[in-house]
Image: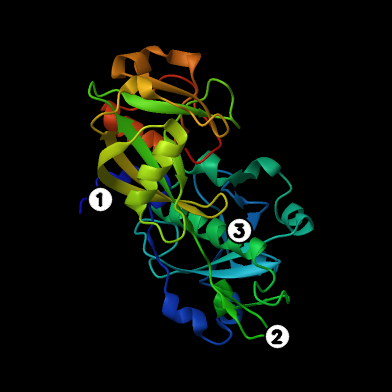
Amino acid sequence: MSFAFTSRLPLSRHAVDRDSEARAAPGLLDTLQTDAATRVLALWRGSALMEATAPDRLRLLAPGRVPAGDLRLYLGRSLARGAPEPVGTPLVAVVLTDEQAVALEPDESRWAPLRHVATTLSDRDAGLFTETLGVVNWHASHSHCPRCGAATLVENAGWTRRCPDCGGQVFPRTDPAVIVLITDADDRILLGSNALWEHNRYSLLAGFVEPGESLEAAVIREMFEESGLRVTDLVYLGSQPWPFPASIMFGFTARLAVGQAPEDLLPDGEEILDLRWFSRDELRASGDAIILPGRSSIARAIIEHWLGEPLDFGPDAVHGWR
């Protein structure tokens, strides 16, 4: 398959060997803590520390400069040539408390959330930040055993949680979701406005994949539930992790099925309040009248793929997976 589309997705970029075999090494994190070559990504309330002189670059610190933190995670080894650190540099993430973060860097403007810097980071830093946030968010929601309720223990350099009572292991999970650009016979696209958004914010339709369901079946079901339309001719474009808190978005295009008319729209009235068809000229002419998906989202990349040019008009949405 071609990676031409995926390469345009900010959070799908990476330049790190995750080095999964090393995670089980006894005392790995303690060993790396004493290795002067190790570099540490500091995370505080979902934001990472950025370089003062280069706000588009993560500030990776020597291990002795970062407090132990609430959680440590082995990220792997750098593969990036031309980065400040050489290829093969071991990389660790540390989650800091409020007190530790203030002591390390009291200027809150130096701490940036992933959504705000995703498009300006290098491939390696974007991948590091995305990996860290996804695993850290998983830890936050799996502090107790799903079988017996006992508090779980962190193992395998941050990649496993084990229950000391029943012995069960819990591994990081990602929730799959589909996001779809639907076109009609005139090659117009369908955009919807979610009930939780501003009234003039529009994006592609999307939804989670249910247990026992294929991606393709999820596309057909979700599009019908949200728009009342049946779709066909599904084409997979690519995927992007979305660690807010724990999703991966699978991007598709689809066309209206035979027998469906564009005017057959039926928004569900609960999640989707409004649906509109846009030609390329209509979308360009919308200007500031509608808010479009943010630059870090896969929705924006899919729309730009259809449009044939960057979305350099209208305000961007900062939040949301669409």
**Amino acid type of the residue tagged 1 in the rendering:** Phe
Residue 282: % across, % down:
35, 14
- Rendered residue at 40%/38% (across/down): 223
Q: Quadrant of the N terminus?
A: bottom left
In terms of secondary structure, where does tag 1 sit? loop
Q: Which residue is mark 3?
A: 137
Q: Residue at x 57, y 52 (%)?
A: 245
Mark 1, residue position: 3
Residue 66, compared with residue 291, is above or below; it is: below
Amino acid type at image mark 2? Asp
Q: Name which residue type carries label 3.
A: Asn
Tell me where residue 177 appears, x and y as whole percent. 44, 49
Please tell me which residue lies in front, 166 or 294.
166
Secondary structure at numbered mark 2: loop
Report the residue at 57% width, 48% height from top: 50
Q: CA distance from mark 1 to mark 3?
A: 28 Å
Say whether disc 1 or disc 2 marks the residue closer to the N-terminus. Answer: 1
- The residue that disc 2 covers is 165
How many marks overall?
Answer: 3
Label 2: how many Cα within 10 Å (few below 14, some 14–19, many 20+): few
